[in-house]
Image (tube, grey):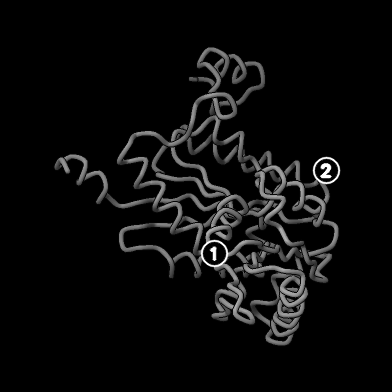
């Protein structure tokens, strides 16, 4: 290996780790995710866990989710302008702004659900998702079908947390935490009874079970999703440094021409796009 390539591969890694969770309303959830990520990161890797201003407030409904997506896009465009990061992790299971950020960023952009589903396929034939509430089930099924993995999905099981903000209490109130753990066990066993060989927990419960050290239920892996995102980001940064290629620029993730970026920046008043 050439010395210059070896030097690039061994440089520190900085990861932007984007949650939808509000940094004020869900501060305990954000802090718990930060703890999981710091534990998973290799020496020399910095993971900047960021929430949003108002997010995870009814994002089971598309109308509210739309505003969360806009904020994540704005964060990505600001990062594109300022630089300083080696990967952008979308640490939310609904794939917010995934295509938009891959169009615009010249660093690896990773998505929670995409990484977890394809990793689950390396660990078992069929996987199941545990979702915060029933309203999210159709959306998760749609996402998995979009990956071409519909036949690998054994099902989606819902918890009873219709108010997602209630997840913040599980990190401070042991009684509420025990209730969530029991719900996770019940939902996972329902999924296993339907053929699941790997379980993916969507939402803050993934950080909760990770910090409790629960990585397997009845011989079925429960993915440590937030840790997995850190390790996958480190791997993709390494491949980017090795090959110089972060993403395909053919068709789906083709970057807009600079002239159009500048024009949109002027017309829409988006400072981060004014210089192409």
The front one of 98 and 53 is: 98
Label 1 and label 2: CA atoms lie apart by 35 Å
- Circle 1/circle 2 CB separation < 8 Å: no
Quadrant of the snapshot with the N terminus: top left
The front one of 242 and 26 is: 242
Q: Position of residue 49 (x, y in %)?
A: 52, 57
Question: Measured along the vertical axis of the image, is residue 17 above or below residue 25?
Answer: above
Q: Position of residue 12 (x, y in %)?
A: 30, 52
Q: Residues within 10 Å of mark 2 (few under 14, many from 20)?
A: few
Q: Position of residue 21 (x, y in %)?
A: 66, 57
Question: Measured along the vertical axis of the image, is residue 35 above or below residue 137?
Answer: below
Q: Position of residue 26 (x, y in %)?
A: 67, 64
In the visual, does 23 lie left or right of 156?
left
- Which residue lies at the image location 58% right of the left edge and 79% below the top edge? 214
Which numbered disc, 1 or 2, marks the residue closer to the eye? 1
* Precedes in sequence: disc 1 or disc 2: 2
In the visual, does 26 lie left or right of 102?
right
Q: Residues within 10 Å of mark 1 (few under 14, many from 20)?
A: some
- Which residue lies at the image location 47% right of the left edge and 34% below the top edge? 247
Question: Measured along the vertical axis of the image, is residue 30 above or below residue 14?
Answer: below
Instruction: Describe the element under mark 2 as helix, strand or loop.
Output: helix
Q: Which mark is residue 226?
A: none
In the visual, does 148 lie left or right of 119?
right
Residue at label 1? 123
Q: Which mark is residue 63?
A: 2
Instruction: Describe the element under mark 1 as helix, strand or loop.
Output: loop
- Which residue lies at the image location 67% right of the left edge and 44% below the top edge? 148
The front one of 99 and 121 is: 121
- Which residue lies at the image location 51% right of the left edge and 65% below the top edge? 34
Residue that lies at the very extreme toward the left in this rendered image: 3
Q: Quadrant of residue 271?
A: top right
């Amino acid at each position: 290996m050439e010395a210059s390539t070896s030097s690039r591969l061994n440089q520190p890694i900085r990861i932007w780790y984007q949650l939808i969770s509000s940094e004020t309303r869900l501060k305990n959830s954000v802090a718990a995710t930060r703890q999981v990520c710091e534990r998973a990161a290799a020496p020399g890797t910095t993971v900047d866990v960021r929430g949003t201003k108002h997010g995870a407030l009814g994002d089971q409904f598309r109308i509210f989710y739309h505003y969360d997506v806009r904020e994540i896009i704005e964060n990505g465009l600001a990062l594109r302008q300022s630089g300083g990061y080696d990967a952008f992790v979308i640490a939310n299971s609904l794939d917010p702004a995934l295509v938009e950020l891959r169009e615009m960023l010249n660093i690896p952009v990773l998505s929670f659900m995409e990484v977890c589903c394809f990793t689950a396929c390396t660990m078992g034939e069929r996987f199941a998702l545990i979702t915060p509430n029933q309203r999210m089930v159709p959306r998760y099924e749609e996402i998995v079908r979009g990956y071409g993995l519909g036949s690998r999905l054994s099902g989606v099981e819902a918890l009873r947390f219709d108010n997602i903000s209630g997840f913040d209490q599980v990190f401070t109130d042991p009684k509420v935490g025990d209730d969530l753990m029991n719900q996770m066990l019940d939902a996972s066993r329902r999924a296993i009874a339907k053929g699941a060989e790997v379980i993916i927990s969507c939402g803050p419960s993934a950080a909760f079970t990770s910090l409790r050290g629960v990585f397997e239920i009845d011989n079925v892996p429960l993915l440590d999703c937030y840790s997995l995102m850190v390790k996958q980001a480190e791997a993709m940064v390494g491949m980017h440094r090795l090959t110089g290629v972060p993403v395909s620029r053919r068709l789906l993730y083709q970057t807009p021409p600079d002239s159009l970026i500048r024009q949109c920046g002027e017309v829409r008043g988006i400072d981060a796009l004014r210089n192409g």
